[in-house]
Amino acid sequence: MTRPLPGPLSAEVDRVARAERLLVASDFDGTMSAIVDDPAAARTLPETDAAIRALAELPQTVVAVVSGRSLAMLHQLTGLPPAVHLVGSHGMEFDESFAAGLDEADRDRLELLDRQATALAARFAGLQVERKPASIAMHYRHVAPEQRAAAVEAIATGPQLVDGAHVTTGKEVVEVAAVQTSKGYALDRLRAREHVDVVMFVGDDVTDEHAFAVLREGDLGVKVGSGPTAATQRVAGVADVAVLFETLVQLRRDYLSS
Ligand SMILES: O=P(O)(O)OC[C@H]1O[C@H](O[C@H]2O[C@H](CO)[C@@H](O)[C@H](O)[C@H]2O)[C@H](O)[C@@H](O)[C@@H]1O
């Protein structure tokens, strides 16, 4: 038996579980997976993985993971079946052909950003550069504490100032994209394409606020952890996310079989 959620959240999950057609969308890092030192070592909590798979098997229930990761990395890290829609690059990468759609100016900008990030990685030991189809993430988690402010400043006065670059900040990471990204765009697109009448989104980071911002009356946004948010509900951490999804599976199954 899954342990109970706090009262107000429990009531909200019970409400969305009764949607005619429901979209359940989740962020990956910090939501399905704990934040870990090595981005390549992130893994979905087993309970969350099982709940996501179970939800995706239910009728009238659409499940998506909307992440800042590249789509290829998201596939690799989650190993989820095709029944779960994966969207990478902070809501822009719906399929592997996304990069081919970048125009010449976008590609030139991406190369410039890559060159600048590579130069900064040579200057600051521990600065990790993660290359994605339309952006470059610079992780400063492993830069020596006394060098961190200088590294962040160098990013702010270098790649961040590249003409047309779009900047997002996250957990010990600054990401510069050649194109505008938005998890809100992904939710709007999924909502329309899948003809759902209720959307539930769960996320922990700054970019997830774009998704919370497009939620409508009757939807449900759940913020993971502390910090300002437009979400109406909150859980403390990834273990609670597992309970949230497990509870939703039970309630949705009950509703659909009633
Ligand atoms: O939108 P998300 O699925 O939450 O992805 C956001 C970024 O997550 C990853 O970085 C973060 O998680 C890493 C693993 O826990 C951690 O080491 C890092 O410090 C965090 O910033 C990922 O590497 C990025 O590409 C995503 O944009």
Image (cartoon, rainbow, N blue to C red):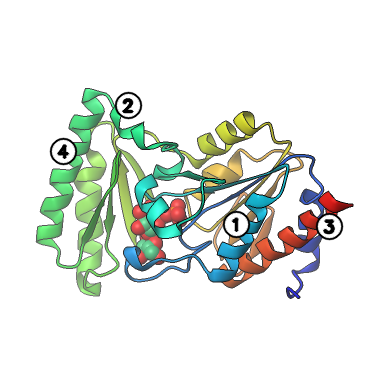
Residue underneath mark 4: 112
Q: Earlier in the sequence, mark 2 or mark 4?
A: 2
Q: Secondary structure at mark 3?
A: helix
Identify the residue shown where x is 21% and y is 73%.
144
Identify which amino acid the numbered label 1 is placed on: Arg
Q: Secondary structure at mark 4?
A: helix
Determine the image quadrant of residue 38. bottom left
The numbered mark at residue 101 is 2
Residue underneath mark 3: 254
Between the residue at mark 4 and the residue at mark 1, the CA separation in whole angstroms equals 40 Å
Q: Residues within 10 Å of mark 2 (few under 14, many from 20)?
A: few
Q: Residues within 10 Å of mark 1 (few under 14, many from 20)?
A: some
Which one is nearer the viewer's eye here, 249 or 33?
249
In this rendering, the answer to whether 114 lies above or below 233 is above
Identify the residue shown where x is 39% and y is 70%.
36
Identify the residue shown where x is 32% and y is 53%.
174
Dot in front, 4 or 1: 1
